Image: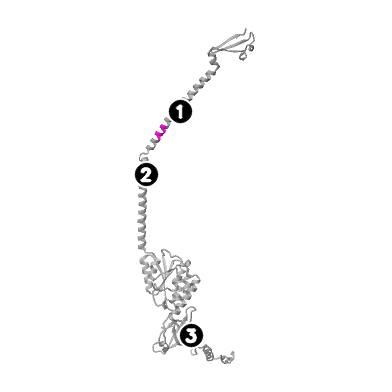
Amino acid sequence: MTTAPSRPAAPPTSPEAPWSVAVVSEKIRGWIARLGDVWVEGQVVQFRERPGAWVQYLVLRDVDEQVSLSVSVLSSVLRTSTATIAEGARVLVHAKPDFFKGNGSFSLRAAEIRPVGIGELLARIEHLRRVLAAEGLFDDSRKVRLPFLPHVVGLVTGRNSDAKHDVIKNAQARWPQVRFEVREVAVQGPSAVREVRAAMADLDARPEVEVIVVARGGGAFEDLLPFSDEALVRAAAACRTPLVSAIGHEQDSPLLDLVADLRASTPTDAAKRIVPDVAEERRGIDQARRSMRQALRARLDREQHGLDGVRSRPVLARPETMVEHREREIGHTIVHARHLLNAALLHASAEVAELCATVRTLSPASTLQRGYAVVQRPDGHVVREPGDAETGTRVRLRLAEGELPATID
């Protein structure tokens, strides 16, 4: 490896020994020339072909960093290039940096221009998809449900585009009262990302906007690249307002679809998803009312049938039957109780009579009735033997009927 000889250091300058503009320009040109040939990738943001000119001019921009470079290229190089040079196209440029001393401008002199292959773009989008998915930006837990009946819908779409017409026409056909806040922006090309982001931020800041729809019709793969841009996808993820992505056709799947709260296959499909169909809702209400009416009528019929069945029972058809039955039961019970009471009284009466007879038989009065007498001294003591009463003692003789006084002699 050989080492390039070192250049002599530039002489210092001073107010007394300044450099001329030409010298400074030459030195800048020399420093830039030392960079050598470079490969540069960017997006064409300005290009207007000049027929008949041997040199064409275009501007390349780094979309993420918003940095631009001027490029000059021979018309013969453009004719042999496989790249389609148009605004929005991504290209690889093999060029040499150049400083034009005449006006002090910097540009690249292109020797070759190649298109960035679709395979490379797909690989980059896939890599970005994995990165954003790992951060959780596509998780279902982040998605919010759209309001059932939004009063104001924010619409980000192309200027005078069919997508705008499809969304508004179909949505108002379904629900005429819906209103739209429309932001017409570039939906392809170098300014698409910036304008779409600004429109989303503007609508998201408006409290009356209840849902935002980003809509674009179909197009080539390169035309839809802005909707897979990392800055745009992150801006969509930061929206607080529910976001609907309606980009291209069913087969198109930009990264905006994955981060949006709802993905619509087409702008027309988006119109059907953001508002209900008034005719369908009315049919649903009518059907629900019919179903409720039928259910209520069936319930009333069922209850009426039950009531009729209960009322047809004998106990309710002639309620006094139950009372009469109970009355007969009570009458029988009373009669039976009387029989039992009479029998008990007769039995008890017989027992009492028997006891009375026994008592009478054992009673002293019964003995007196047979002619016996009870001798009692004045103190009431019964004389049971001769020694109980001395001669001359007055005694009482108790008879069955009364008493007789007597004297012992």
**Relative to 16, 234 lies left or right:** left
Judged by its main secondary structure, the magenta piece is helix
Q: Residue furthest top?
A: 409
Type of amino acid under label 3: Trp
Counting labels gives 3
Q: Is tag 2's residue or tag 1's residue first in the polypeptide sequence? A: 2
Task: Give the distance between the C-alpha atoms of the residues marked 3 and 2, in whole angstroms.
Answer: 97 Å
Q: Is residue 299 above or below residue 359?
A: below
Picture quadrant where residue 176 is located: bottom left
Q: Quadrant of the C terminus?
A: top right
Secondary structure beneath label 2: helix
Secondary structure beneath label 1: helix
Numbered mark located on residue 39 in the image: 3
Judge the density around disc 3: few (<14), some (14-19), many (≥20) Cα neighbours within 10 Å: few
Seen from the viewer's position, the closer of residues 77 and 126 is: 126
Numbered mark located on residue 310 in the image: 2
Query: Measuring 59% from the left and 9% from the top, which residue is drawn there?
Result: 406
Type of amino acid under label 1: Leu
Seen from the viewer's position, the closer of residues 323 and 260 is: 323
Q: Quadrant of the N terminus?
A: bottom right
- Which-is-in-front pick, marks 1 and 3? 1
Seen from the viewer's position, the closer of residues 87 and 115 is: 115
Q: Position of residue 335 (x, y in %)?
A: 42, 30
User: Mark 1 — residue?
Assistant: 341
Secondary structure beneath label 3: strand
